[in-house]
Image (cartoon, rainbow, N blue to C red):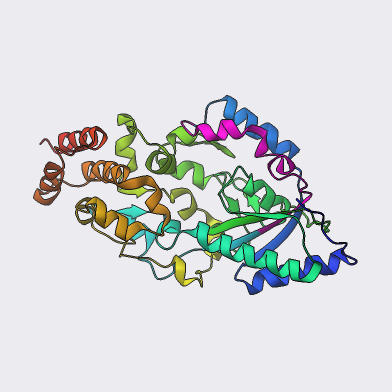
Amino acid sequence: MTTAKPTPDPATLAADIKHWGQALGFQQVGICPARLDADETHLLNWLAAGRHGEMDYMARHGTRRSRPADLVPGTTTVISVRMDYWPGAARAADEVMHDPALAYLSRYALGRDYHKVLRKRLQKLAERISAAVGAFGYRAFTDSAPVLEKALARNAGLGWIGKHTNLINERAGSWFFLGELYTDLELPSDTPATDHCGECQACIDACPTGAITGPQQLDARLCISYLTIELRGSIPEHLRPMLGNRIYGCDDCQLVCPWNRFAQDSGETDFQPRHALDSSDLVRLFAWNEAEFERCTRGSAIHRIGHECWLRNIAVALGNAPTTQAVVEALGDRARHPSALVREHVEWALQQHGA
């Protein structure tokens, strides 16, 4: 990283950065030092317990995730941002989740890929800073590299890490994305957020698979988001009934969180539902061929799982759906699919219907 030009008034610059960030559509901007010593211990213990499942990249990156200067040499300060994504125009999440004929997709994935949206805004923020101070060293991230973004956001005062391991803001709940600028600027830090979960454990009780094994303790191997997005192989049979109609991610722990009564609808049109994915029929989505999947998911976070895992996930959901002629016929149409992975899950689903 290059050396930043001297900033004669760091406090003024920090205030300006927050103002510029909010003008770019971020609901909040915070600043913290690039140090995560205590969080590194938590990370290493989590990895040692194997709770990252088949996400081998988590172990490969090791302490680069908890040592920002190892990832981007010269980093001294992190600018952390958050952007609300709750799609107010979408069909009510509870209604979809409790209708077994419909497909439930995590609310964050209904619109455009958030990586692209946030990264573009972060780049604009960096350019605005550069216009004020001259060339400086930076790199933008949004869930795109080995970064402990929730710990950094907590240290920057954006919220605390809840018992479900998501960040919670007392004025905005948890329906927001996070992004970071790793910089070599010397800026005053904000006060870290404090925990306000208290005795509440609604998220722990609501987890369908028991993936939240304790406060701030998540076993990814049980998490429905991991099973439907990160896992590329077979979904363990004993967990399949617990997935219900969730075909991409899981929001249960956030839906029951009392702090989300303060959540705000996103003003970003990019995060509003596309292709009626907020309330689509499982049978309709299962009928998508690969070309349709590509066309309807290109530019969204869903695209990364590919058509094969898309069919795998929906086959499980159809296995959990009420037995109807349409469901059995849809599964039967995929019984000879070229993918052994798809065929395995289709066969399981047909067995659930006695077919």
As drawn, 95 above or below 241: below
Left or right of 79 in this view: 275: left
As drawn, 313 above or below 42: below
Question: Which picture quadrant has residue 171?
Answer: bottom right
As drawn, 327 above or below 174: above
Q: Position of residue 119 (x, y in %)?
A: 57, 60
> Which of 293/12 is in front?
293
Residue 315 falls inside the magenta stretch: no
Residue 201 in view of the camera: yes
Q: Residue furthest right?
A: 8
> Which of 291/158 is in front?
291
Report the magenta residues as a range: 53-80
Left or right of 152 in this view: 315: left
Q: Position of residue 23 (x, y in %)?
A: 65, 74
> Which of 245/6 is in front?
6
Residue at figure coordinates x 29%, y 38% from the top left: 241
Q: Position of residue 334 (x, y in %)?
A: 16, 42
